[in-house]
Amino acid sequence: MENIQSMVIPRKIVRMVLWFSKLVSCLAIHASILTLASTDVADVVDLGYAKYAGNFTSPHSVAYLGLPYAEPPIGDRRFRAPLPLNTTRLRLQTGGRIVDATSYPDFCVQGTTGGGDAGGAGSEDCLKVNVYTPRGAKKGDKLPVLVYIHGGGYVFGNPQNWPFEHWINQSPHVVIVSVYYRLDSFGFLSHPTFASDPSLGDLNAGFLDQTEALRWVQKHISAFGGDPERVTINGESAGGSSIELHLVVPNNDGLFHGAIAQSVYRTPVPTPDQQEPLFSHYANEAGCGSGSLAAQVACLRNASISALARAQDSAFNGLYNAFHPVLDGKIISELPTVSILNGRFRQVPLLVGATSNETLSSGTISSALKSFFPALSDNDLAEFAQEYPLSAFSSSDEQLRAATGESELRCAREIMAGAFSKVTNAFAYRYNQANPTSSSPAVDHAAENWMMFRGTNTGPNGSTTFTPMTPTQEAFAEELIAYWLSFVRSFNPNTFKLLRSPIWPSYHANSPARIVLQEGSASSSGSHVEAEPQAELARCAFVVSKVKAEQN
């Protein structure tokens, strides 16, 4: 089997495979078509090219699940930029009948979570969105819109694991869209030659998926009652990193008007040249490492998902040995931190923050930093040791967490809030409630996801575990959701906050203050305001000085 996969398949067979793939796609659409009599008209949306029946969740929300926003990136579209949705094709296929959109779609092909699991579950035909609306919302309502881009290191993640029905049921005044985008090698395969020969592949295809989803929102969200002129983009971890990138890349004017960036994943954004060894390893592992570059890409394009899944999992080892955005010289032409520090960003209202103790590393400070940021020199690492002495922290664990976590995640709060506050409204937070299912008392990465999304804990291959919440936890979740949706509705977290919640101060570089989001009781808030510690500000200034070596 491995030998067969490594061969370039004849064109006749490729054409037959593509024809069969399209046939299966058509059959899937026809199998999901409903008759009008079988669904409530109140839960049907007409997009002009197709009508979709949504899933009602009492008392207020309707979820339209798995709506395509681009053409399927299959066959010769693998590793290429998304094509806009062919609405004529869908109009002909549906014939005016209603399509069932009440079940979650296949998620995008997953990579390993890094915990010893193997990826590979999912589908390439995954460029879909889930749209959550208040029941009865209609064109002309002009409800503000939240577009959510999930995390997972650009390697894994399934929007089904971060549901939004309870957000709408709590506040039926917004429309929410969650985006599926290609992950791992399927979304971020790179080679230097791609920049000059796009027939081979497109750099940052997974990021371009997100942009195409935002374009679809602009064209069609009004049919759901949404206002395309009041769109806030939101994401956590790699989703937060995506938000940062959308804020600095060119040619996306008008696609959004506010931003929420949670625990921004400050991964290196390397050059395609630096990723070339990763491409070679991946091609070899997939049985496609011989011949010209064109032959290797053709082989990869014809390889099975299982062969590519094994290859991308094998390559997952360190930050250059992972598939994620690169400096392509076209869409992403500058390190995002450099763009932000120089004022080259979308001047939209911003809400940004991190958890108290998060880090993505273990080991010694030097080994962890070198693994995460391969371009750091020995001199850089010596300076980190001086900047983060054990005497400045309560324990060696907290020393390691700060020395790594501030560069990897936390300092995005100071960098982004400081720059944005000079030209627009900015709000910063420190999330300070540990995930109650964790064995650690630390407030780790993604702890707020557990609280905001019904006790979710992401597992391998698109899975999650939802844990029941106590009344106190549910009260805290309502407080968080109210702050977030208040920002979506007014670009200010205070306008529609809960009465029991404290005022969230805007951020100012000369007197930086942030809210500490913390659980209280079922009837009172535990959140409070604090000044940013001067020691933390100084350390983040040091982190900024290492931006070229950290490449973020």
Image (tube, rainbow, N blue to C red):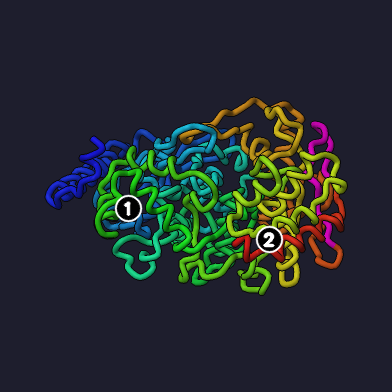
Magenta span contains residue 231: no
Q: Quadrant of residue 100?
A: top left
Q: Position of residue 282 (x, y in %)?
A: 38, 48
Q: Position of residue 171 (x, y in %)?
A: 65, 44
Residue under numbered circle 1 = 78
- Compute the Cα span from label 1 to label 2: 34 Å
In this rendering, position of residue 437 left or right of residue 61: right
Amino acid on which the number 2 mark rests in the picture = Leu
**516 w.r.t. 348: above or below:** above
- Image quadrant for the C terminus? bottom right
Residue under numbered circle 2 = 350
Q: Nearer the viewer, residue 479 or 243?
A: 243
The answer to whether residue 170 is visible is: no
Taking the view exactly as shown, the residue that stands out farthest to the front is: 378
Task: Look at the image and give the residue range highlighted in magenta.
Answer: 512-527
| Count of numbered tags | 2
Q: Residue at x 70, y 43 (%)?
A: 364
Magenta span: helix, strand or loop, mainly?
loop
Q: Quadrant of residue 35?
A: top left
The label number, if any, that marks residue 436 in the structure image: none
Q: Position of residue 3 (x, y in %)?
A: 22, 39
Taking the view exactly as shown, the residue that stands out farthest to the left is: 12
Q: Residue at x 67, y 40 (%)?
A: 363
| Of the image marks 1 and 2, the number of the one nearer the N terminus | 1
Q: Nearer the viewer, residue 274 or 309?
A: 274
Q: Nearer the viewer, residue 153 or 294?
A: 294
The answer to whether residue 14 is visible is: yes
- Image quadrant for the N terminus? top left
Element type at marker 2?
strand
Amino acid on which the number 1 mark rests in the picture = Arg
Element type at marker 1?
loop
